[in-house]
C-alpha cells in the first residue's frame, strides 16, 4: 500500500518510492559492489567506477529537494539506504554522506542564488565535496579553530589548514568552517561557513593512512591566501557558521548511526551463518549456548539500533529538535557496530582474523563511527544536557 512519508522539504515521497529505491540499491550492491570490496579495501583504492554508478543511481542528490534536481528523500528513508550500503561496504557511504551534509548546509542556510548555483550540480554528482571542520589542533572544540577569513572588497582571503577531510582529494569543493572574527565573545559568533571550490591557494595533502574506512580519501587541506568570492559565504552573513554546522551535525549523526546499523547487521549475518556451518564437539557451534548468547545479544543490538535511528530520523523529518535522539542513535548504533564486529570475529575464530573474509574489516571499520560527527564521549554529554533541559526542576 502506498503511504506518504513525512519530509522536511515537502517533496512528495511514498513508501512505494522508498521500496523501489531500496530494491534498486540492493540489486546494484549485489551485481556491481559485493565481489569487488575485498580487493578495493585491501588496496585502499578509490572506487571510481562505483562513484559513476552512484551518480546514475541519484545517490549524490538523495536528500536534495526535487526542485533542485535531487530525489527529495526523507531522512528516515535515506537512513535505510545508508544502512544497506554500509552492510556491504561502509566506505562508500562516506563518499555521498558528507557530500549531502554539505548540500544540506546550502539548502537549509544558503541564499536562493546559492541553492540554484550549487544544488543541481551537487544532485547529479557533477560537483562533489564534503565538510571541512576539523583542524590539526582541534576537532571536538570547533570554536577553537584557527583558519581565518578576512574581507577584502567583494571577496575574502582565507589562511589555515584542515585535516581528516573526507573527499578532500577526489571532491571539488567543501563547506569550510572559518573564523571571520577572532576577538568576539562568545567565540561562535565569529564563525562563518563558506562553500570553497578548489583553485589557487587551496591545496590538498596526500591520502591519509587509516586503520579502516579504506578506499575513500581522507586528507589535509591547506589555504594559503586563498581568495574566495563573498557570495560563497553560505547565507551571505558572517557569524552564523557555527549554527549552520551544528544544524548539519544532527543529520550527520543520524547518518553515522545508520552506518553503524549496517556494520552491526553485516557482522550479525556473517556470525549467524558461520555458527550454523562450523562444527566443534560433533555439532554446529551455534548449538553451543556460549555462541547462542553472543548471537542473542548481537541481534538485540541490531534491532534496538535500527529503531533508534528510525526514531531520530522521523523526528528530524517532522522538523523537530532531535539532538538528543540523534545523539542516542549515534552512540548506541556505533557501539553496537563495535561490539558486534568484535563478537563476530570471536565466533569466526582464526578465520575472523584472516584477510580473506570481510570479518576483520568490520572490526577495522567500526571504530570510525565512535569518532566521527562528534565522539561518543560528547554524545553522552549532549544527551545528559538535553535530558536535564527537557526535565527542569
Ligand atoms: C576517518 C575520519 C574521517 C573524518 N572525516 C572528517 C571530515 O570529513 N570532516 C571533518 O571536519 N572532520 C572529519 N574527521 C574528524 C573528526 O570529526 C574528529 O576526529 C572528531 O571530531 C574528534 O576530534 P579530534 O580527533 O580532534 O579529537 P579531540 O577533540 O582532540 O578529542 C580527543 C578525545 O578527548 C575527548 N574529549 C574532547 N573534549 C571533551 C570534553 N569536553 N569532554 C569529554 N571528552 C572530551 C574526545 O571524545 C576524544 O576521546 C574525520 C576523522 C576520521 C578519523
Image (cartoon, helix red, strand yellow):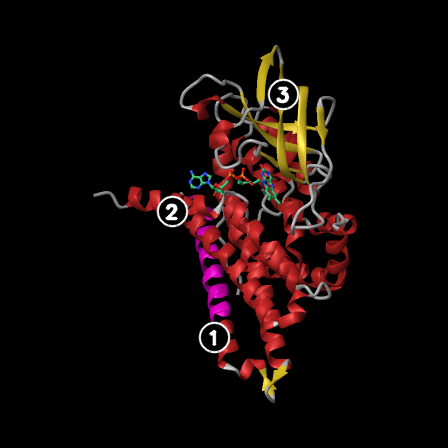
Q: Nearer the viewer, mark 3 or mark 1?
A: 1
Q: Can residue 289 be seen?
A: yes
Looking at the magenta stretch, what is its main secondary structure? helix
Q: Is residue 40 left or right of residue 210?
A: right
At x 74%, y 48%, the residue is: 51
Q: Which mark is residue 293?
A: 1
- Does residue 247 lie above or below 284 as drawn? above
The residue drawn where x is 72% and y is 28% is: 203
Numbered mark located on residue 383 in the image: 2
Mark 1 vs mark 2, CA separation in Å: 30 Å
Check disc 1 and report its element: helix, strand or loop.
helix
Question: Does 275 appear in magenta?
Answer: no
Q: Residues within 10 Å of mark 1 (few under 14, many from 20)?
A: few
Q: Vertical placement of 195 versus 247: above or below?
A: above
Q: Is mark 2 within 8 Å of ligand 1?
A: no
Q: Secondary structure at mark 3?
A: strand
Residue under numbered circle 3: 159
Q: Quadrant of residue 61?
A: top right
Amino acid at each position: 500500500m502506498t503511504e506518504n512519508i513525512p519530509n522536511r522539504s515537502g517533496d512528495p515521497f511514498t513508501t512505494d518510492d522508498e521500496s523501489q529505491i531500496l530494491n534498486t540499491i540492493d540489486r546494484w550492491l549485489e551485481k556491481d559492489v559485493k565481489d569487488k570490496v575485498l580487493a578495493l579495501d585491501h588496496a585502499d583504492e578509490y572506487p571510481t567506477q562505483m562513484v559513476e554508478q552512484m551518480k546514475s543511481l541519484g545517490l549524490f542528490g538523495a536528500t536534495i529537494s526535487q526542485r533542485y534536481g535531487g530525489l527529495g528523500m526523507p531522512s528516515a528513508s535515506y537512513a535505510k539506504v545508508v544502512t544497506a550500503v554500509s552492510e556491504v561496504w561502509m566506505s562508500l557511504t562516506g563518499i555521498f554522506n558528507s557530500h549531502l551534509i554539505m548540500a544540506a548546509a546550502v539548502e537549509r542556510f544558503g541564499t536562493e542564488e546559492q541553492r540554484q548555483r550549487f544544488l543541481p550540480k551537487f544532485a547529479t554528482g557533477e560537483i562533489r565535496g564534503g565538510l571541512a571542520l576539523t583542524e590539526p589542533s582541534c576537532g571536538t572544540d570547533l570554536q577553537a579553530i584557527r583558519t581565518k577569513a578576512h574581507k577584502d572588497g567583494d571577496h575574502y582571503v582565507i589562511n589555515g589548514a584542515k585535516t581528516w577531510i573526507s573527499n578532500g582529494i577526489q571532491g571539488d569543493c567543501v563547506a569550510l568552517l572559518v573564523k571571520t572574527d577572532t576577538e568576539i565573545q562568545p567565540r561562535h559568533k565569529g564563525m562563518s561557513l563558506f562553500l570553497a571550490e578548489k583553485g589557487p591557494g587551496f591545496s590538498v595533502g596526500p591520502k591519509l593512512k587509516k586503520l579502516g574506512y579504506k578506499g575513500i580519501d581522507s586528507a589535509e587541506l591547506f589555504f594559503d591566501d586563498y581568495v574566495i568570492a563573498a557570495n560563497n559565504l553560505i547565507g551571505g552573513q558572517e557569524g552564523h557558521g557555527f549554527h549552520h554546522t551544528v544544524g548539519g551535525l544532527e543529520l550527520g549523526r543520524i547518518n553515522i548511526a545508520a552506518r553503524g546499523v549496517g556494520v552491526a547487521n553485516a557482522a550479525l549475518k556473517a556470525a549467524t551463518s558461520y555458527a550454523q556451518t562450523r562444527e566443534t564437539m560433533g555439532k554446529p557451534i551455534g548449538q553451543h549456548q556460549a555462541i547462542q548468547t553472543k548471537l542473542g545479544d548481537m541481534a538485540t543490538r541490531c534491532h534496538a539500533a535500527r529503531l533508534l535511528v528510525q526514531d531520530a530520523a522521523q523526528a528530524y523529518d517532522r522538523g523537530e529538535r532531535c539532538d538528543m535522539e540523534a545523539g542516542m542513535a549515534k552512540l548506541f548504533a556505533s557501539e553496537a557496530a563495535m561490539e558486534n564486529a568484535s563478537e563476530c570475529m570471536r565466533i569466526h575464530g582464526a578465520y575472523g582474523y584472516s584477510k580473506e573474509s570481510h570479518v576483520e574489516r568490520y572490526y577495522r571499520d567500526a571504530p570510525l563511527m565512535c569518532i566521527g560527527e562528534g565522539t561518543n564521549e560528547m554524545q553522552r554529554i549532549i544527551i545528559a544536557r538535553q535530558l536535564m533541559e527537557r526535565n527542569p526542576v
